[in-house]
Amino acid sequence: MHKYVIIGVQGCGKGTQANLLAERFNLTHISVGDIFRSNIQRHTKLAARIKRIMDAGHLVPDEIVDEVVRKRMDEHDWNYGFVLDGFPRNRAQTEFFLESYDIDAVIRILVPDEVVIQRVLARRLCGSCGIDYNLMHHRPAQPDRCDVCGGELVSRADDVEETICKRIADYHTHTEPVIDLFRRKELVFDVDGDRPIPDVQNEIRRRLALPLDAAEA
Ligand code: AMP
């Protein structure tokens, strides 16, 4: 069983890298941001509590996050392990999580703030099927239309410059320091995320001593 946490500022590519790892090694990808967005799309009771906070780029209160994570972990659909993406984001969430679970490794993806701002502003999401695009390096064939389902491409409500800067500041103040809580016992390493997606993935696998795909070995 592999249990990983992937940490990095918004737009560093942690969701993409977590997905690639999860698909290849049968791990469960747990993204708290995705769980929140799915609630907002379905207009659940939880959505009413978090939508305004998320749109403003603030962190959702710890008690809500902890409850969501506890419920998600209780599904126990992670026989081969999990990759946590976007959690924990501060000391209290880290302490809450480590009370019940352990972690094998923490992967920190490093990308300069000015690069992530450009990346996030270019991010688009299909309003129908949810596929991600990026106008810089994963362009749709037709601007504003999903290549797969033809749905309309939209920006996330929280992907505007002011909100991005707020999230970056929160990351440096609250999230980066949690690395030290993990460093006491788990493997913690940094990966340069300002490179093509496959190169970042291969470096992560090398550092985790996981097999590379045949063409890369
Ligand atoms: P993400 O998809 O990880 O960028 O998360 C999107 C938004 O969801 C964040 O800006 C927060 O408002 C909220 N969120 C996601 N994960 C957490 C967390 N661990 N703690 C607090 N808020 C979170």
Image (cartoon, rainbow, N blue to C red):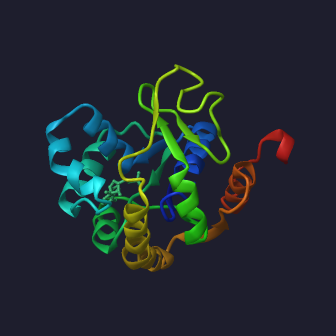
Is residue 73 visible to us here?
yes
Tell me where residue 119 sits by quadrant.
Answer: bottom right
Is 196 above or below relative to 29? below
Considering depth in this image, is 28 or 173 the residue closer to the camera? 173
- Looking at the image, residue 62 sits to the left or right of residue 150; the answer is left
How many discs mark residues in the rendered view?
A: 0
| Residue at point 29%, 63% (across, down) | 58
Tell me where residue 134 sits by quadrant.
Answer: top right
Percent coordinates x, y for residue 101 in the rendering: 36, 58
Percent coordinates x, y for residue 77 in the rendering: 40, 36
- Looking at the image, residue 65 sits to the left or right of residue 110; the answer is left
Considering depth in this image, is 5 or 197 the residue closer to the camera? 197
Percent coordinates x, y for residue 165 in the rendering: 42, 68
Quadrant of ligand 1: it is bottom left
Considering depth in this image, is 66 or 50 the residue closer to the camera? 50
- Looking at the image, residue 189 sits to the left or right of residue 1; the answer is right
Q: Residue furthest top?
A: 149
| Residue at point 36%, 75% (across, down) | 174
Is residue 110 visible to us here?
no
Is 50 above or below relative to 179? above
Percent coordinates x, y for residue 114 in the rendering: 58, 69
| Residue at point 65%, 62% (across, down) | 193
